[in-house]
Image (cartoon, rainbow, N blue to C red):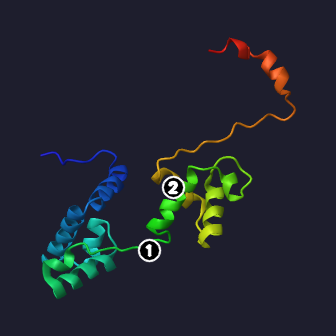
Amino acid sequence: MKALTIPDAAMAIPGLQEEIRRSQESRYDHRLHGILLVAQGMSCREVAGLLGDAHSTVANWVRRYDEEGLAGLVEGDRPGRPKRLTEEHLAQIATALRMSPKDFGFSSNLWDGKTLAAYIGKQWQIDLGVRQCQRLFRQFGFRLRKPRPLIAGTDPLQKEEFKKNPPSCKR
Protein backbone atom coordinates (compact mmCIF):
# COMPACT_ATOMS: atom_id res chain seq x y z
CA MET A 1 0.00 0.00 0.00
CA LYS A 2 1.29 3.44 -0.93
CA ALA A 3 2.28 5.73 1.96
CA LEU A 4 0.13 8.84 2.26
CA THR A 5 1.79 12.23 2.46
CA ILE A 6 0.59 15.75 2.99
CA PRO A 7 1.64 18.04 0.15
CA ASP A 8 3.58 21.09 1.34
CA ALA A 9 3.69 19.77 4.92
CA ALA A 10 6.15 22.47 6.00
CA MET A 11 3.49 25.10 5.28
CA ALA A 12 0.64 23.03 6.75
CA ILE A 13 2.24 22.32 10.13
CA PRO A 14 2.21 25.91 11.50
CA GLY A 15 -1.41 26.33 10.41
CA LEU A 16 -2.43 23.09 12.09
CA GLN A 17 -0.59 24.04 15.29
CA GLU A 18 -2.32 27.42 15.28
CA GLU A 19 -5.68 25.69 14.88
CA ILE A 20 -4.91 23.52 17.93
CA ARG A 21 -4.11 26.64 19.99
CA ARG A 22 -7.31 28.39 18.89
CA SER A 23 -9.77 26.93 21.42
CA GLN A 24 -9.60 25.72 24.98
CA GLU A 25 -11.00 22.30 24.06
CA SER A 26 -8.39 21.64 21.41
CA ARG A 27 -5.57 22.74 23.74
CA TYR A 28 -6.94 20.36 26.39
CA ASP A 29 -7.08 17.52 23.84
CA HIS A 30 -3.52 18.37 22.76
CA ARG A 31 -2.32 18.03 26.36
CA LEU A 32 -4.21 14.74 26.73
CA HIS A 33 -2.42 13.35 23.68
CA GLY A 34 0.90 14.43 25.15
CA ILE A 35 0.18 12.71 28.47
CA LEU A 36 -1.02 9.58 26.66
CA LEU A 37 2.23 9.36 24.68
CA VAL A 38 4.31 9.79 27.85
CA ALA A 39 2.19 7.12 29.57
CA GLN A 40 2.93 4.78 26.64
CA GLY A 41 6.66 5.12 27.31
CA MET A 42 7.85 8.04 25.20
CA SER A 43 10.10 10.67 26.76
CA CYS A 44 9.01 14.29 27.16
CA ARG A 45 11.56 15.28 24.47
CA GLU A 46 10.15 12.74 22.01
CA VAL A 47 6.58 13.85 22.69
CA ALA A 48 7.57 17.50 22.37
CA GLY A 49 9.20 16.77 19.02
CA LEU A 50 6.08 15.03 17.77
CA LEU A 51 3.60 17.63 19.00
CA GLY A 52 5.71 20.70 18.23
CA ASP A 53 5.99 21.91 21.82
CA ALA A 54 8.96 22.56 24.10
CA HIS A 55 10.03 19.57 26.20
CA SER A 56 9.69 21.70 29.35
CA THR A 57 6.04 22.33 28.40
CA VAL A 58 5.36 18.59 28.12
CA ALA A 59 7.18 18.05 31.43
CA ASN A 60 4.91 20.69 33.03
CA TRP A 61 1.85 18.85 31.69
CA VAL A 62 3.09 15.58 33.20
CA ARG A 63 3.85 17.24 36.54
CA ARG A 64 0.41 18.90 36.67
CA TYR A 65 -1.26 15.62 35.68
CA ASP A 66 0.61 13.80 38.48
CA GLU A 67 -0.41 16.43 41.04
CA GLU A 68 -3.99 17.23 39.98
CA GLY A 69 -5.11 14.51 37.57
CA LEU A 70 -7.12 15.54 34.51
CA ALA A 71 -8.03 18.84 36.19
CA GLY A 72 -4.36 19.83 35.92
CA LEU A 73 -4.62 19.79 32.13
CA VAL A 74 -7.58 22.19 31.97
CA GLU A 75 -6.82 25.70 30.79
CA GLY A 76 -6.40 28.08 33.71
CA ASP A 77 -7.45 31.72 33.83
CA ARG A 78 -5.10 34.16 32.20
CA PRO A 79 -5.91 37.48 33.82
CA GLY A 80 -3.36 39.54 31.91
CA ARG A 81 -2.30 43.04 32.66
CA PRO A 82 -4.86 45.16 34.54
CA LYS A 83 -6.59 47.86 32.51
CA ARG A 84 -5.24 51.35 32.96
CA LEU A 85 -8.44 53.03 31.80
CA THR A 86 -11.56 52.56 33.91
CA GLU A 87 -15.08 52.44 32.51
CA GLU A 88 -15.50 56.06 33.63
CA HIS A 89 -12.37 57.04 31.68
CA LEU A 90 -13.67 55.27 28.59
CA ALA A 91 -17.03 57.03 28.85
CA GLN A 92 -15.30 60.41 29.09
CA ILE A 93 -13.07 59.54 26.12
CA ALA A 94 -16.10 58.55 24.04
CA THR A 95 -17.69 61.92 24.85
CA ALA A 96 -14.49 63.81 24.06
CA LEU A 97 -14.13 62.08 20.69
CA ARG A 98 -17.49 63.50 19.65
CA MET A 99 -16.10 66.98 20.20
CA SER A 100 -13.23 68.78 18.52
CA PRO A 101 -9.69 68.45 19.88
CA LYS A 102 -9.60 72.27 19.86
CA ASP A 103 -12.17 72.22 22.68
CA PHE A 104 -9.47 70.63 24.85
CA GLY A 105 -6.64 72.97 23.89
CA PHE A 106 -5.11 71.00 21.01
CA SER A 107 -4.22 72.58 17.67
CA SER A 108 -5.52 69.84 15.37
CA ASN A 109 -9.04 69.70 13.94
CA LEU A 110 -9.36 65.91 13.89
CA TRP A 111 -8.63 63.27 16.52
CA ASP A 112 -5.76 60.92 15.77
CA GLY A 113 -3.71 58.50 17.87
CA LYS A 114 -1.16 61.12 18.96
CA THR A 115 -3.81 63.66 19.92
CA LEU A 116 -5.83 61.11 21.88
CA ALA A 117 -2.69 59.89 23.68
CA ALA A 118 -1.88 63.51 24.61
CA TYR A 119 -5.46 64.05 25.82
CA ILE A 120 -5.37 60.93 28.02
CA GLY A 121 -1.97 61.92 29.41
CA LYS A 122 -3.17 65.46 30.14
CA GLN A 123 -6.47 64.33 31.72
CA TRP A 124 -5.35 61.38 33.86
CA GLN A 125 -1.53 61.19 33.64
CA ILE A 126 -1.84 57.82 31.91
CA ASP A 127 0.75 57.16 29.22
CA LEU A 128 -0.85 55.17 26.37
CA GLY A 129 0.85 54.44 23.08
CA VAL A 130 -0.45 55.79 19.80
CA ARG A 131 -1.37 52.29 18.60
CA GLN A 132 -3.42 51.61 21.74
CA CYS A 133 -5.25 54.91 21.19
CA GLN A 134 -5.97 53.87 17.61
CA ARG A 135 -7.53 50.66 18.98
CA LEU A 136 -9.78 52.81 21.16
CA PHE A 137 -11.11 54.53 18.03
CA ARG A 138 -12.12 51.15 16.65
CA GLN A 139 -13.58 50.11 20.01
CA PHE A 140 -15.85 53.18 19.95
CA GLY A 141 -16.81 52.63 16.30
CA PHE A 142 -14.85 55.54 14.85
CA ARG A 143 -12.80 55.30 11.69
CA LEU A 144 -9.61 57.11 10.87
CA ARG A 145 -10.15 60.30 8.89
CA LYS A 146 -7.15 62.08 7.50
CA PRO A 147 -7.37 65.68 6.41
CA ARG A 148 -6.63 66.22 2.75
CA PRO A 149 -3.38 68.11 2.45
CA LEU A 150 -3.35 71.41 0.59
CA ILE A 151 -0.62 71.19 -2.00
CA ALA A 152 1.95 73.87 -1.38
CA GLY A 153 1.74 76.76 -3.79
CA THR A 154 -1.76 76.14 -5.11
CA ASP A 155 -4.12 79.05 -5.37
CA PRO A 156 -7.65 78.04 -4.24
CA LEU A 157 -9.26 80.49 -6.72
CA GLN A 158 -7.32 79.07 -9.67
CA LYS A 159 -8.23 75.58 -8.51
CA GLU A 160 -11.96 76.43 -8.49
CA GLU A 161 -11.72 77.94 -11.99
CA PHE A 162 -9.97 74.82 -13.29
CA LYS A 163 -12.63 72.42 -11.99
CA LYS A 164 -14.93 70.80 -14.51
CA ASN A 165 -18.13 71.79 -12.70
CA PRO A 166 -18.08 75.25 -11.15
CA PRO A 167 -19.62 75.62 -7.67
CA SER A 168 -22.80 77.22 -9.09
CA CYS A 169 -23.57 74.00 -11.06
CA LYS A 170 -23.43 71.69 -8.05
CA ARG A 171 -26.70 70.14 -6.96
Q: State left or right for residue 83 relative to residue 12.
A: right
Residue 164 visible to an observer of this rendering: no
- Which residue in the structure is indicated by mark 2? 94
Q: Name the residue at 84% across, 21% down.
A: 158
Q: Quadrant of residue 167?
A: top right
- 150, 105: nearer the viewer: 105
Residue 144 visible to an observer of this rendering: yes
Q: Name the residue at 30% across, 44% down.
A: 7
Q: Name the residue at 60% across, 50% down.
A: 99
- 28, 49: nearer the viewer: 28
Q: Name the residue at 18% across, 77% down.
A: 38
| Label 1 or label 2, whichever comes before in sequence order | 1
Which of the two marks, 1 or 2, is nearer to us in this view?
2
Q: Quadrant of the C terminus?
A: top right
- The image position of residue 2, as x and y in percent, is 16, 45
Q: Image height check: is 130 above or below 121?
A: above
Q: How many marks?
A: 2
Q: State left or right for residue 118 relative to residue 4.
A: right
> Mark 1 falls on what kind of element?
loop
Amino acid type, residue under disc 1 in the picture: Arg
> Mark 2 falls on what kind of element?
helix
Q: Image height check: is 146 above or below 39?
A: above
Q: State left or right for residue 5 relative to residue 170.
A: left
- Which residue in the structure is indicated by mark 1? 81
- The image position of residue 148, as x and y in percent, is 70, 36
Amino acid type, residue under disc 2 in the picture: Ala
- The image position of residue 112, as x and y in percent, is 62, 52
